[in-house]
């Protein structure tokens, strides 16, 4: 069954969901959601380490004064959200690969081993370095054949927020998740210092239900919009102590722009992949639009306690898989049709959808036994908060600000309880 055929019936007149055999239901396995923890090696150098959502930073060794990092490009299998896994290409067992953190002025050496079935390279997006280290296959260097290792060596001339990704068969390799973050800290640890430093990359995939590999030829009609190749609610929560200065670094390697919006706070755009923005030139926002291939760095004081949404403001990008070709059924009474269909096909269950809106889709997430999804896919809406369904998915997470959170504590403090008299209420 095709995803768009199946899911347009949800968005259209009727979702024909029969009581499928249990073997066909999506296997519900425990989601492996790494909490993301700061690098102890970076902290020992006196810098505030970056917390990569659902990820980690890459350790290094030092040889003759040169920091040496090791990356392996390889096929991987990774959980996108509970009940769904995908076959990606990534680095060191993950997509994105591990974040590389170093310091302005460091001389670094990166060993890249290719375990993919085809050649590859790595481009160090935004870094200023010798031409022969830029990583464009055929232009600056020979491609890295399968089974071989390539060595990149250069000195980091400026601090900032950068990325790495292939410049070889990009349509396939980037579409399958090959990407990573490259953070260069200022030489002076007190320069541009923050209390918490978060980072993630935006990626989009087109993975049909009951499959695990993204369609690499898709240009616009993606069905998974992700932070670090995960969808909400598998995306790590951002936390901060009230009054702390927080930095969030976001890179966009999808095929469209993303207006990233934070609730409850005003931030300033403090950097791009071209470098830091001088304080006098920074501007206030609550939403910053990140175009394809760009990075944006935002900073703010977490002065408002609570649970605050943080998400892409394109509404389809905070949804799970959906069809886009169904008819508009708002205002159409489908109840009689549902009754007739169940008489024609005894033992089958049909749900009229779309007559009053699509909030009913959230209920699908809790009806797996009665109305199972196709194997290895996600509901269109998912996630539950303290007051019921959040009705989000995809590019969405939560910033949790607490007055009593310990400095350096990144554990989820659970849901916020609003003080009496400070919450909206429903009138009788």
Image: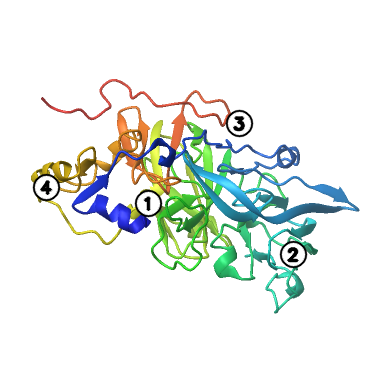
Eyeballing the image, is 374 above or below 277? Answer: above
Distance, label 3 to label 2, CA atoms, is: 41 Å
Q: Quadrant of residue 275?
A: bottom right
Instruction: Tell me the CA gap for discs 1 and 2.
Output: 34 Å
* Circle 2 Cα neighbour tier, 10 Å, few/some/many (<14 / 14–19 / ≥20): some
Q: Quadrant of the C terminus?
A: top left
Which of the two residues, 36 or 48, is positioned nearer the viewer here? 36
Mark 4 and mark 1 lie on one chain; the one further toward the N terminus is: 1
Q: Which residue is mark 2?
A: 146
Quarter of the image containing the N terminus? bottom left
Q: Secondary structure at mark 1?
A: loop
Q: Residues within 10 Å of mark 3 (few under 14, many from 20)?
A: some
Residue depicted at x 63% and y 62%:
165
> Given contact means CB atoms under 8 Å apart, are the residues at marks 1 and 2 in contact?
no
- In the rendered image, the residue lying farthest to the right is 64
On screen, residue 313 above or below 140? above
Q: CA distance from mark 1 to mark 3?
A: 36 Å
Q: Residue at x 20, y 27 (%)?
A: 425
Q: CA distance from mark 4 to mark 1?
A: 26 Å
Nearest to the eye among marks 2 and 4: give it.
Answer: 4
Look at the numbered disc 3 and give the secondary structure of its residue.
loop
Q: Helix or strand or loop: what does disc 4 sit on?
A: helix
Residue of label 3: 408
Which residue matches tag 4?
337
Q: Earlier in the sequence, mark 4 or mark 3?
A: 4
Mark 1, residue position: 321
Q: Disc 2 and disc 4: Cα gap in Å? A: 57 Å
């Amino acid at each position: 069954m095709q995803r768009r055929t199946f899911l347009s019936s949800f968005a259209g007149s009727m979702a024909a969901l029969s009581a499928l055999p249990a073997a066909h239901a999506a296997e519900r396995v425990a989601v492996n959601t790494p909490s993301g923890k700061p690098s102890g090696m970076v902290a020992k150098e006196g810098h505030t380490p970056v917390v990569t959502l659902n990820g980690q930073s890459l350790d290094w060794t030092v040889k003759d004064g040169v920091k040496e990092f090791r990356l392996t490009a390889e096929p991987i299998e990774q959980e996108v959200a509970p009940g769904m896994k995908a076959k990606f290409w990534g680095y060191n067992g993950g997509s994105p690969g591990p974040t590389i953190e170093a310091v302005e002025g460091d001389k670094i050496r990166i060993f890249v081993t290719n375990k993919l079935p085809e050649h590859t390279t790595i481009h160090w997006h935004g870094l200023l370095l010798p031409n022969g280290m830029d990583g464009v296959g055929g232009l600056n260097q020979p491609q890295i054949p399968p089974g071989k290792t390539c060595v990149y060596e250069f000195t980091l001339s400026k601090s900032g927020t950068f990325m790495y990704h292939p410049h070889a068969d990009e349509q396939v390799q980037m579409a399958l998740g090959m990407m990573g973050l490259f953070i260069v800290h200022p030489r002076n640890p007190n320069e541009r210092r923050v209390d918490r430093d978060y980072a993630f990359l935006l990626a989009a995939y087109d993975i049909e239900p009951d499959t695990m590999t993204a369609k690499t030829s898709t240009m616009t009609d993606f069905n998974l919009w992700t932070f670090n190749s995960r969808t909400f609610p598998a995306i790590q929560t951002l936390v901060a102590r009230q009054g702390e200065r927080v930095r969030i670094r976001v890179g966009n390697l999808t095929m469209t722009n993303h207006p990233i919006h934070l609730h409850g706070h005003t931030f300033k755009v403090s950097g791009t992949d071209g470098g830091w923005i001088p304080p006098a030139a920074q501007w206030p926002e609550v939403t910053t639009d990140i175009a394809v291939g760009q990075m944006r760095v935002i900073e703010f004081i977490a002065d408002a306690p609570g649970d605050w949404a943080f998400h892409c403001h394109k509404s389809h990008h905070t949804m799970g898989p959906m069809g886009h070709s169904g008819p508009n059924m708002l205002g159409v009474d489908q109840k009689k049709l549902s009754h007739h269909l169940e008489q024609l096909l005894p033992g089958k269950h049909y749900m009229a959808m779309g007559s009053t809106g699509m909030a009913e889709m959230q209920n699908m997430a809790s009806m797996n036994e009665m109305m199972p999804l196709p194997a290895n896919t996600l509901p269109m809406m998912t996630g539950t908060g303290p007051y019921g369904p959040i009705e989000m998915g995809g590019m969405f997470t939560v910033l949790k600000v607490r007055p009593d959170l310990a400095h350096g504590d990144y554990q989820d403090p659970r849901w916020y309880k609003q003080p009496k008299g400070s919450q909206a209420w429903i009138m009788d």
